[in-house]
Image: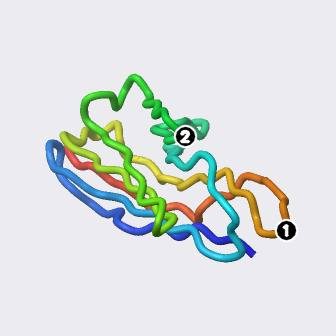
Amino acid sequence: QVQLVESGGGLVQAGESLRLSCAASGSIFSINAMGWYRQAPGKQRELVAISNVGSTNYADSVKGRFTISRDNAKNTVYLQMNSLKPEDTAVYYCYGNIIRRDAIRRDYWGQGTQVTVSS
C-alpha cells in the first residue's frame, strides 16, 4: 500500500558529489520522519540523516558534507552528498515513518541504492 523508491546512486571518485532521491507513494495520509540509512559490507545498518517535523539529525561522520531535505508536497526526501569518501561506500536505504489513510502508522523502507566511492 505504501512504497518508497530510491534513485541516484552510482559510482563516483573521492571528492565528488551525488544526490539521492526517495519518493513515497501509495495510501499515504501523512509522513512523520523521513531519512536515510546505510549499510556497508559486514557492518550494521546505520543512520545517515533524518528529517522530522522541525528537526534534522546527521551522523557525525557526514556532518558538514551531507544535507537532507524534503519536498512535502511530493512526499520526497533528498540526500545531497558532497566531498564523498571511500568510507561512504554502502547501500543507502530510504526510511519513512508514515501514517496511512487507514490510520495505521508504521515504518517503511526502500529497496536500497548502491553508492560506491573510489579512491
Q: How many marks?
A: 2
User: Which residue is disc 2 drawn over?
Assistant: 53
**3D distance between C-alphas at marks 2 and 1:** 22 Å
Residue 106 higher or lower than 73, as above or below: above
Q: Quadrant of residue 29?
A: bottom right
In this view, 46 is above or below 63:
below
Above or below, comparing residue 89 to residue 114 in the picture: above
Q: Amino acid at mark 2?
A: Val
Identify the element where label 2 is drawn.
loop
Callout 1 environment at 10 Å: few (<14), some (14 to 19), or many (20+)?
A: few
In x, y percent, where is residue 19?
Answer: 29, 57
Q: Position of residue 5 (x, y in %)?
A: 53, 70
Q: Residue at x 40, y 23 (%)?
A: 60
Based on the displayed image, in which of its 4 quarters is residue 11 positioned?
bottom left
User: The residue under label 1 is which amino acid type?
Assistant: Asp
The image position of residue 51, as x and y in percent, is 49, 41
Q: Alpha-carbon neighbours of circle 2 within 10 Å: few (<14), some, or many (≥20)?
A: few
Residue 116, disc: none
Residue in the picture at 36% in, 51% down? 79
Q: Please say if the residues under marks 2 and 1 sit with CB atoms less than 8 Å apart.
A: no
Q: Which tag, 2 or 1, sits closer to the chain's start?
A: 2
Q: Quadrant of the N terminus?
A: bottom right
Q: Is residue 87 left or right of residue 58?
A: left
The image position of residue 55, as x and y in percent, is: 48, 33
Residue under label 1, please give it: 102
107 or 110: nearer the viewer: 107
For residue 21, side relative to residue 80 (left or right) = right
